[in-house]
Image (spheres, rainbow, N blue to C red):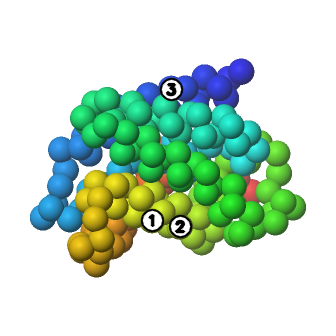
Amino acid sequence: MINYGKHIILFFICIFIQVLVFDGINFGGYIDPYFYVFFILVLPMETRKWTLLFTSFLLGLGVDLFSNTIGMHAAAATFMAYMRPKVIQYLSSRRDYDAGMQPLIRDMGFRWFFSYSFILVLLHHITLFFIEVFRFSEFLTTLYRAGISTLATLLVIILTQYLFFYKKKRR
């Protein structure tokens, strides 16, 4: 029950940080960090698929309500949640992690977390930006924007991990 409480609090924190801090950040029209995806990334490995999809949809919808984006974030977050189990399966076998582990740097290591989050955040951003543009005439510009925003988002997520979630193991 305690983990549910932590995740509910993190859910609302991610929405509020996104809306209050990161929605106001736009570097040169290309770099848009989307911190709220952090919630989807750090849910426990054994989270049920329907729970993952439903909470991700609600997360995206919450950002949409405050950002006036009419379902774009809900669609991108739900797609990201749909792809998450496939990415985890691709990157590691079931025996690589124990029950209760979260996909965090402290549990899985930097290399694994970076690969995992890079793939999922890139998929999220590509989906979001192509829904936003809704045409292929700006294909390369949209891919560039998705790539650069992915790097900015990853930088924020990794800094958050080291500042708030990383505890050195005692020997």
Q: Secondary structure at mark 3?
A: helix
In front: 131, or 105? 131
| Pointer 3 residue | 9
Whether tag 2 and tag 1 are in contact, CB under 8 A, the answer is yes
Q: Is residue 25 above or below residue 113?
A: above
Which label belongs to residue 95? Answer: none
From the viewer's perspective, tell me whether residue 116 is left or right of residue 36.
right
| Pointer 2 residue | 119
| Pointer 1 residue | 122
What is the crowding at mark 2: few (fewer than 14 residues within 10 Å), some, or many (at least 20)? Answer: some
Whether tag 3 and tag 1 are in contact, CB under 8 A, the answer is no
Q: Secondary structure at mark 1?
A: helix
In front: 52, or 16? 52
- Residue at 39% over, 30% down: 62
Q: Secondary structure at mark 2?
A: helix
Amino acid type assigned to the residue bearing label 2 in the image: Ile
Image depth: mark 3 or mark 1 in front = 1
Q: Is residue 151 above or below residue 164?
A: below
